[in-house]
Amino acid sequence: MQRFFFLLLLSAVLWPLCSQAQQEHYPHLTLWSRVQIAKEPNPNWNFVGTFFLRRQNNFNENRYNPLNNPLMIGGQMLITHRNTQNTVWVHIAQLSYMVSNQLLGKPADFNVPIGKEIRYAGGVEFNQEVNEKLTFRQRFLQELRFFKANDFQPVGRVRGRANVRYQLTPFVSANAVTEILVHDPPLIRGQKPFRFHQLWVGGSLLWSLSERVNLETGYTFIHGRRTNIVEFDEQNVLNLHLSVDI
């Protein structure tokens, strides 16, 4: 639980630091949707496949329609091992492939080429079930990202996430999350090591539609710095996630 409050405190400290140097910031309304299929052959192993689709508004047409323009499409595979006590989850491999469009904040963004990325991530997640209703989780991942625009040379990023979930009823749970993303080596040429990238703060409701099907609806605010210039994107993300256990 100490790790949870450490990440929460770090988020509060980083927010004014990463905001004070803003030169330009661009607001966005986006929709992040995904369908997730999970298989748990035994209590120690979990395999997850995910398809995700993201859309964004177009400030030239309608700032309040998150379906105007494409943002990202992709897929992901995750292999996780859990200890017998279900307190430590080791994410052995998270492999993703994504085709992404630039967030549209200014006219020049319409000319940015479509990007392609292959991503590997691995790390550890700590699970603390305080009681039958309240759960704390903290996750730390190291990513290696391979962009077509960077000749598929590896680029590093580390991310730390704190999550709390509370079961409101047998069928509905409330979820709150904060996540910090920081660039670390290996770096894109000219980039400073351990430079702030993004800060996420959000909440959601998890709806148990059946024993094996869950729907998550929520909102996330993402404050992120652009890669090569001191400009910031501020995403207002609507989340719609469907998960199925097989």
Image: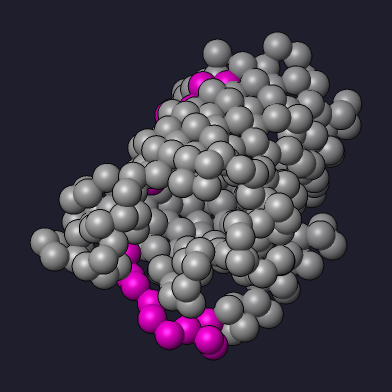
- The answer to whether any part of residue 135 appears in the image is no
Q: Quadrant of the C terminus?
A: top right
Location of residue 58 by image quarter: bottom left
Left or right: where 87 falls relative to 118:
right
Q: Is residue 10 above or below residue 122?
A: below
Main secondary structure along the magenta-highlighted residues: strand
Is residue 46 located in the magenta-colored stretch of the structure?
A: no
Up-down: is 206 above or below 189? Answer: above
Label count reads: 0
Q: On the rendered image, what quadrant is the N terminus found in?
A: bottom right
Considering only vertical position in the picture, is 138 above or below 172? below
Q: Which one is in front, 98 or 29?
A: 98
**Residue 162: x percent and y percent?**
68, 56
- Whether residue 28 is visible, yes or no, is yes
Which residue: 41% across, 69% down? Answer: 234
Extreme right residue here?
84
Residue at 71% in and 52% down: 186
Where does the magenta region start and end?
Answer: 19-38
